[in-house]
Amino acid sequence: MSSTPKSGRWIRVGSVERLEKRGATITFDIDRSKFLSGFVIKRGERIYAYVNHCPHNGSKLDWVPGELFDESGQYLICATHGAVFEPETGRCVGGPCINQLLIPLQVKLEDQSVYVEVVSSLVLQ
Ligand code: FES
C-alpha cells in the first residue's frame, strides 16, 4: 500500500484528555463516501494519528470501534488477522504484513484540542 499525501484541512477530533487513559483512542471520519476513517492515540507525551486501514488487505483495524490495542496495551492490533503495529511508528512487527506501515497523519494540539490534517487526495492501494 502507498499513499499520496498532500496538504489538507485540519479537523478537531476531540480533547486531549480523552487520550489520557491507557488504551484510549479517538476515531474520526476522513471520507465517509469511501468508508475511510482514522484514529488518534497518545503514547507518553506524544500524540499519533493513522488512517484506519491495515496494510495487509485494507480492513479497518478495529472490529469494535476504537478498540485498537492488544491485550498488553503495548501494540496496535488488527482484528482481522492479528497483525500488530508499533504505536509510535505504525510499523507492523508481527503478522502477515510484517514491516509494512500504517499511514500516518499530521497531528497538532491547540488549547487542549487534538487536530488532525485530513488529506482528501489520500489514495490507498
Ligand atoms: S487485514 Fe489486518 S492483518 Fe489482515
Image (cartoon, helix red, strand yellow):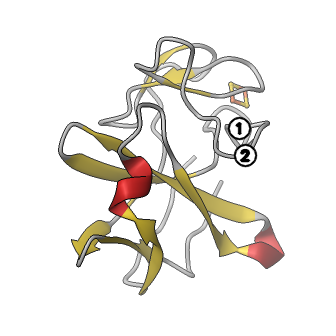
Q: Nearer the viewer, residue 49 or 12?
A: 12
Q: Residue at x 41, y 37 (%)?
A: 90
Give the amino acid at mark 1: Asp
Q: Quadrant of residue 79?
A: top right
The location of residue 124, given as percent across then percent down, is 63, 59
Q: Nearer the viewer, residue 125 or 18?
A: 18
The location of residue 26, given as percent across then percent down, is 53, 55
| Label 2 crowd bin: few (<14), some (14–19), many (20+), radius 10 Å | few
Q: Quadrant of residue 122?
A: bottom right
Q: Residue at x 46, y 82 (%)?
A: 11
In the visual, does 95 lie left or right of 79?
Answer: left
Q: Say above or below: 30 vs 50.
A: below
The location of residue 15, given as percent across then percent down, is 40, 67
| Label 1 crowd bin: few (<14), some (14–19), many (20+), radius 10 Å | some
Per the rendering, the mark at residue 98 is: none
- Residue at the bottom extreme of this rendering: 9
Q: Say above or below: 99 vs 18.
A: above
Per the rendering, the mark at residue 62 is: 1
**Alpha-carbon span between mark 2 and mark 1:** 6 Å
Dividing the image into four equal quarters, which quarter contains ligand 1? top right
Give the amino acid at mark 2: Pro
Residue tagged 2: 65
